[in-house]
Image: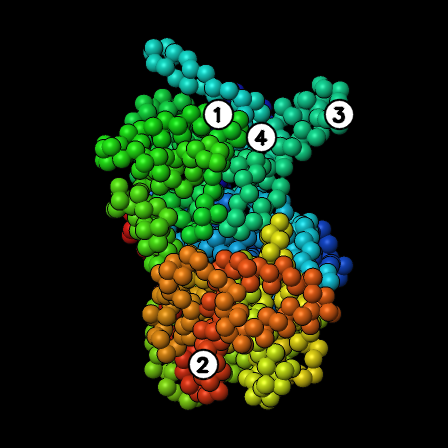
Amino acid sequence: MTDTAPSPSVVSDESPSTDVRRIGPAFRTTHPLASGPVVSPQTTVDGFVETFLGELNYGQGTLLSQSTVNDQYLALARTVRRYLMADWLETGARRRQAQQKTIGYLSAEYLLGRQLGNNLLATNLQDIAEDAMRRCGIDIAALRAQEVEPGLGNGGLGRLAACFVDSLATMDVPCIGYGIRYEYGIFRQTFEADRQVELPDSWLSLGNPWEFPHPERQVLVGFGGRTETVTDAAGVERSTWTPDWQVLGMPYHYMVPGFRNGVVNTLRLWSARATQDFDLQIFNSGDYAQAVRAQTFAENISKVLYPEDSTPQGKELRLQQQYFFVACSLHDFIDNTLPADFDLRRLPERIIFQLNDTHPVIAIPELMRILVDRKGFDWDEAWEITQACFAYTCHTLLPEALEVWSVDLLGRLLPRHLEIIYRINEEFLERVREAFPGDEMRARRMSIIAEYPDRAVRMAYLATVAGAKVNGVAELHSQLLRDKVLPDFSQLWPEKFTNVTNGITPRRFVRLANRRLSELVTDTIGDGWVTDLDRLRELEPWADDAAFRAEFRRVKRENKERLVKLLRVRDGLELPTDTMLDVMVKRLHEYKRQTLKLLHIVSLYEGVVSGRVPAEDLTARTFVFGAKAAPGYHMAKEIIFLVNAVSDTVNADPAVAGRLTVAFPANYNVTLAEKLIPAADLSEQISLAGKEASGTGNMKFALNGALTIGTDDGANVEIRRLVGDDNFFLFGMTEPEVERLRPGYSPSSYYEENPRLRATIDLLASGHFTGGDRRAVAPVIDNLLHQDSFMALADFQSYLDAQERVDAAYADEDAWSRSAILNVARSGFFSSDRSMRDYLERIWHA
Ligand SMILES: *Cc1c(COP(=O)(O)O)cnc(C)c1O
């Protein structure tokens, strides 16, 4: 797929590895057949069957009558791939011709979700494939279920990257998504005795039909070693870096199809390999076992996704991963994508690298190193270019989530990069001192290098100094970013800061996940909404139409029935279909306040068991949780245990049978989200105000016709403004109120003064849900009463009151449906297509 013969690929200054040379230049000939066209299979059931059987016979080497479900799944996937291939090759050729600016999306995570359904949707082959499989005696649903989703991300941040590349393909914007092909993605969660147990996600073990390895585009990446200053032939002083070990990056290409527009962009994920030097060591060392261990060492780099969400651990392997993938990506673009004679002074005309959080920020000194050390630019010119090639998206407000790397570690692993960072910092602090003479405290605060507790590089500061733009991910978040997280920087460069509110792709999260709602919407307003989500506005008048509301309720009910069936088979759960479905699904984090949700459930239950409230007076609700905890996050795991314990007790108690049901299906992931969200009535978005940067789960729910109960936080603020106060259940403190309450906050005073809260906590603390074991609940209870960093107790009463408003609203079926329809009609803004337009206009200028 390359026009240029691949040059030997080196990131370090070392000579190229022979592995790369051995592959040889790309084959080129003037024979007319050599440049295609690639012929797609016929878009008919017959054509599909023929291609499928061909894949089964010649690809899988089996007969239909002998084939396993996995054979059939792989053959089906490869069949769909064939229909995409001509468009992929054509898009690639067109992009190389056009010399347009490309978006290089740099993200350590892509939480893609299953590919088969999405690619059938994009190619409009759903019905043909279903018929074709039926003709072969195969139920396509069983094949869909065979796919293990690529879980190459933790949660919202990785899912956002997946939505963005989907939108860019649908909008025909040139984009290369760069990331890491983890051999093991986010762990598979199971529960044993109500506690989370993590199992490895061996998603590649049955074969991956969606990826294409490209060994001719391998890249060498160096680590460690030392730097020297040498005077070159022209008498100029230059730094050279001699790494002491290297690994190869092997790219795997994934198709990113636009929605039925003939465009297929590329996601390029890097996998680490040992170099041939390692192989030679195996033969030469005599210590075979040691040599093989060295090989494993290299391949460890892309072995596993770190399962921490929002709380990085500062582990050396993680820094290796970060540098590995950005070094591969920069090299890939500069040396293997741009024409060989490209004038790098014009680099910003051809690429903008968007940094998805700080994980890829080491790309900044890497580009400086390429330009200065390898391409002979002088420092100032290189800095000018670099500043125009990067933009930074911040995803957090939590101080503990702001990544820092100890100078020690960084200097050991990437000595030249540390020198470059020091020089960037020196020149930056000079500018600060010019702008604010005499304000030495400010210069210290703003330094990219923190001095305490240990010397460390603040990656967010580096990104802010170097980036052309810095954006937050929702209006409130961007404002807090300017005022609270990076105030000194926003004073120095107010124009650098901007907002782009997150979005989600309506293809996966409405059209694919909620086929019934999609059909109803399309029957009512046509199908243009799938790529122009603002058109959902046209549904507004239908909210007042009784027949439409009835249809809307039928859709919800059928989605619930589908979910109940799934959870019966998947988790052995028995859930009712005719209750309010109240859903809280997201990573387990204290700031998201799953405990507040749990307090609500226990307070309802306590009302019944204490005899205060007749069970019949409760609105029948089914509560669904879904959440993974980072394996080292002890409090989060205690909360998971408690939710499961409450679930066991409540579900088994005849006193609340049919009224309160609590389900916690294990292993929340994109596949489960696609089933849960379309069935939900109520969306729980209850983080402490000022802590959730944006959220995207909140948008998925609103677009699928759930009403939100939520705090004034993240994108909830914008959802509420758009759908209207009457169609949103607001509760809790605002961010300024939180700040005012913070000094001297005493959670126990709420316990003392609120009898309902006290009864709720007492019931939990009594061991009622843990077979009398009070010690098992103590970690969560003690934390709530004595620390409660996220102020669940302060918001408890307000939350309860809001939940009562929910009950009252739900009792009026027509009014509820009306609100739900208005949520759908007014949430078109949250399409990631709109996010991409905002990035293009405010940041990328492409
Ligand atoms: C959307 C999504 C998230 C993000 O959810 P939030 O509620 O915004 O935190 C996390 N995990 C999965 C699987 C998702 O689909």
* Identity, as a three-letter code, of the amino acid under mark 1: Pro
* Identity, as a three-letter code, of the amino acid under mark 4: Val
Residue at disc 4, CB closer than 8 Å to ligand 1: no
Label number found at residue 288: 3
According to the picture, the residue beneath numbered tag 4 turns out to be 247
Q: Earlier in the sequence, mark 4 or mark 3?
A: 4
Secondary structure, mark 2, is helix
* Identity, as a three-letter code, of the amino acid under mark 2: Arg
Left or right side of 47 for 801: left
Secondary structure, mark 4, is strand
Alpha carbons under labels 4 and 2: distance apart: 59 Å
| Residue lying at 36% horizontally and 43% vertically, measured from the top left | 391
According to the picture, the residue beneath numbered tag 1 turns out to be 415
Q: Quadrant of residue 260?
A: bottom left
Left or right side of 505 for 661: right
Q: Position of residue 177 (x, y in %)?
A: 46, 46
Alpha carbons under labels 2 and 1: distance apart: 59 Å
Q: Earlier in the sequence, mark 2 or mark 1?
A: 1
User: Is any atom of residue 6 visible in this view?
Assistant: no
Alpha carbons under labels 1 and 4: distance apart: 17 Å
Marks 1, 4: nearer the viewer: 1
Marks 2, 1: nearer the viewer: 2
Marks 2, 3: nearer the viewer: 2
Residue at disc 3, CB closer than 8 Å to ligand 1: no
